Amino acid sequence: MALSHLNLLRPVMCRLLPAVVRTPFVAHKAVPSTPPASRAVILPNYVRHYATKKSKVKAKAQTGKVNINAALVEDIISLEEVKEDMTAVLAALKDDFSRNLSIRTSPGALDHITVTTNDGKFPLNQLGQISMKSPQLLVVNMTSFPEATAAVTRALQESSMGLNPEVEGTIIRVPIPKVTREHRENLAKLAKQFGNKAKESLRRVRANAVNQVKKSKEGVSEDTIRLIEKQVQQMADGYVTDIDKQLATKTKELLG
């Protein structure tokens, strides 16, 4: 009986109950995660700065610089005297430049000429009295050493100044050529000779100082000797730089 009633109510219940919509199940394929080894790694901005050749040289120069207290080594050598001798070389170069390498004519323009005689070599101004008659004419009076007149004349002719001296007894007239490009170039060459001469003098000062240090090895450590020698070399290098600067300035002035 109950079963029959239930069968009768089935259509009604089907209308009242909402339709059940079944959503089909779709299986999603799992995407495997990227292994750690294959993942792209984003690094922060980082730039490695490599030392340039110039910076390496500069660093080497700074680390190799020596500055010895002169009072601590005065029993071995006087660094102040070495400095004074090197300063004197630079001062002599400046004096040579100002007296002998002027574009304008002056009596000192012939001082640098060396005269070879039977008694040796002498600067021209020690053998003859030089005077200026005009901007284009110098006169050398050989009254004090007339026997050296021929040697002075030859030295003037062989100089790099392009001179053609005229001899009248013990008087040598020296016409000065006009300031041509060739004359300027000759003066620049002479400036270079003065610079090389100054560097030679500087090397002698350095060599004498180093020899003095080597003679004092007894009772002095090898490290101290090396440091002093390095200090002297460092001083000489500084003056060589000064000589090059003076030469460059004078050459620019002469060549115009």
Image (cartoon, rainbow, N blue to C red):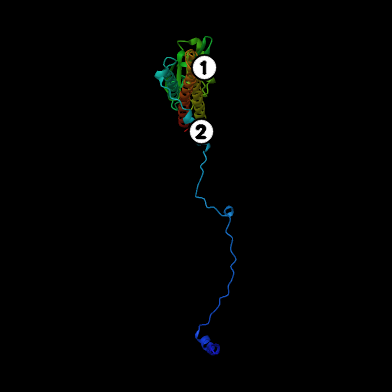
Of mark 2 and mark 1, the one earlier in the sequence is 2
Q: Quadrant of the N terminus?
A: bottom right
Q: Which residue is mark 1?
A: 153
Q: Does residue 126 appear anywhere in the picture?
A: yes
**Rendered location of residue 39, percent (x, y):** 57, 55
- For the point 53% across and 36% down, which residue is it? 53
Instruction: Name the kind of residue labelled 2 in the image.
Output: Val
Answer few, some or many: residues within 10 Å of disc 2's Cα (few below 14, many 20 plus, some between 14 and 19).
few
Q: Which residue is mark 2?
A: 57
Q: SS at mark 2?
A: helix
Residue 29: give its label.
none
Q: Say above or below: 220 vs 1.
A: above
Q: Nearer the viewer, mark 2 or mark 1?
A: 2
Instruction: Name the kind of residue labelled 1 in the image.
Output: Thr
Q: Say above or below: 25 vs 95.
A: below
Q: SS at mark 1?
A: helix
209 or 106, nearer to the observer: 209
